[in-house]
Amino acid sequence: MAAGKKQEKPKGPPSIENKKARHNYEILETIEAGIALLGTEVKSLRAGQASMGDAYAVPRNGEMYLVNLHIQPYQSAGAFNHEETRSRRLLLKKSEIQKYTARIQEKRLTMVPLKLYFNQKGIVKVLLGLGRGKKLADHRETEKKTQAKREIERALRHANR
């Protein structure tokens, strides 16, 4: 056994994060949901080929759908490939759908996907955030808070030297 070599853990399928969601929305609550996908979509997700930039969840006919989730076509599928930005059904309980539909319509909130990942059983899950869109002043306020936090940390580091 060679010295200095580390055992690498086998990496699982990648998780895809929506980095802009927490920047553009004030997330009030998070929900984990399943998502109904085709086989070629799952294979593309395992390869890490998806984008959630403009995606959001919308209630339709007593069900919840994820709209504008872009999953690239699977290269080996040929003619049997999926549509890239189709609406995909979210797998939630009826009571959850009714609860979040009411909150979306009454309080003018938005459901955005925060993360798309595979659970321990290899099933695709989506972490949704129920949030309110930030305005320009909110963006500036959060930027000021992060700047102040960084300056405090920097000052503490220099003081501890």
Image: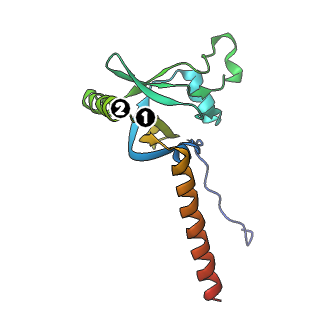
Pointer 2 residue: 104
Residue at 53 percent across and 56 percent down: it is 142
Three-letter residue code for mark 2: Ile
Q: Quadrant of the C terminus?
A: bottom right
Q: Quadrant of residue 131?
A: top left
Residue closer to the observer: 66 or 6: 66
- Residue 6 in picture, x, y percent from top left: 68, 65
Counting labels gives 2
Give neighbour class at mark 2: few <14, some 14-19, many 20+ (Cα, 10 Å): some
- Residue 110 in picture, x, y percent from top left: 43, 34
**Does residue 54 appear in this view?**
yes
Pointer 1 residue: 110
Q: Earlier in the sequence, mark 2 or mark 1?
A: 2
- Residue 133 in picture, x, y percent from top left: 48, 40
Residue at 58 percent across and 31 percent down: it is 54
Mark number displayed over residue 59: none
